[in-house]
Image: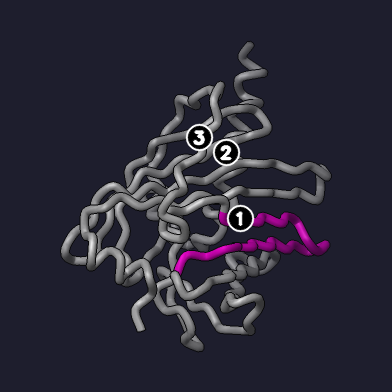
Amino acid sequence: MLPILLLLLLIIPHHPFFIEYKTISYFVSSNSTLYGLIIENITNIYSNDTVKFDFYLINLNYSEYIGPIVEFDNLSSPTILYYFPQVGSDIAQKGSSVFQLVGEKNGCYIYENTQHPVSTVSIVTYYYVNSSGVPSKIIFLQYGLNGLVSNNTYVLYASNLINPSERIYFPSGLHKVSQTFSLNAFKNEVDNIVFSLIVVGIPVLLLFSKKKYNNNS
């Protein structure tokens, strides 16, 4: 059975869709928490399952944002789009990462992936996905030699795939960060590092940019 997202895209192939997450990133060493929003706004859908979307990253701690970053991905095998095409199967592929179905809770399938980018670091990722293929929650746990380093949790905030009446929430009074980058280009630069590290690390970029502004002021 096709996930709801693919069915909708087949029925209304040029209708824009968006997925928005609230992010909570806790860093053990500094005992600090970074709050943010991630928006993926699909603007074009092509016949070969390729989608074009705008990516926004919002740092609520410092009222800053990066975006729009224009990216492309494929619905059949998404790499950077927060979407799971193989809902319900025991094994699911997302980019180069293989996820194992480890349970079900509150109508969601729970998928797990563990990777070791270096010998002293492990990344454990959990996707909670319902029949729509849109994750309701994503958890990235990073461990080092001394245990947990960070806990990055993404909770679905809004999506018109789930509720057609919902709209993107973009807070007012934000300052745009001048630095821009491509998620795909960033990934290609670090082929020897698991892409999960990039996904986990992206919210920290705005924190560093704020420190840079303070140092230059």
Tag nearer the camera, 3 or 1: 3
For this rendering, which residue is in front, 155 or 106? 106
Q: At numbered mark 1, what does the secondary structure look like: helix, strand or loop? A: strand
Give yes or no for residue 110 being in the magenta stretch.
no
Residue drawn where x is 18% and y is 66% of the image: 48
In this view, the residue farthest toward the front is 165
Q: Where is residue 130 in the image (x, y as percent from the top left)?
A: 52, 73
Q: Where is residue 111 in the image (x, y as percent from the top left)?
A: 57, 77
In this view, the residue farthest toward the top is 217
For this rendering, which residue is in front, 13 or 181? 13
Q: Mark 2 points at which residue?
A: 205
User: Is 184 left, or right, of 120 in this rendering?
Assistant: left
Q: At numbered mark 3, what does the secondary structure look like: helix, strand or loop? A: loop
Residue drawn where x is 78% and y is 61% of the image: 148
User: Is 2 left, or right, of 66 in this rendering?
Assistant: left
Q: The disc labelled 3 sits on which kind of residue?
A: Phe
Q: Do the residues labelled 1 and 2 touch (CB within 8 Å)?
A: no
Q: In which quarter of the image is the N terminus?
A: bottom left
Magenta segment range?
Answer: 133-156
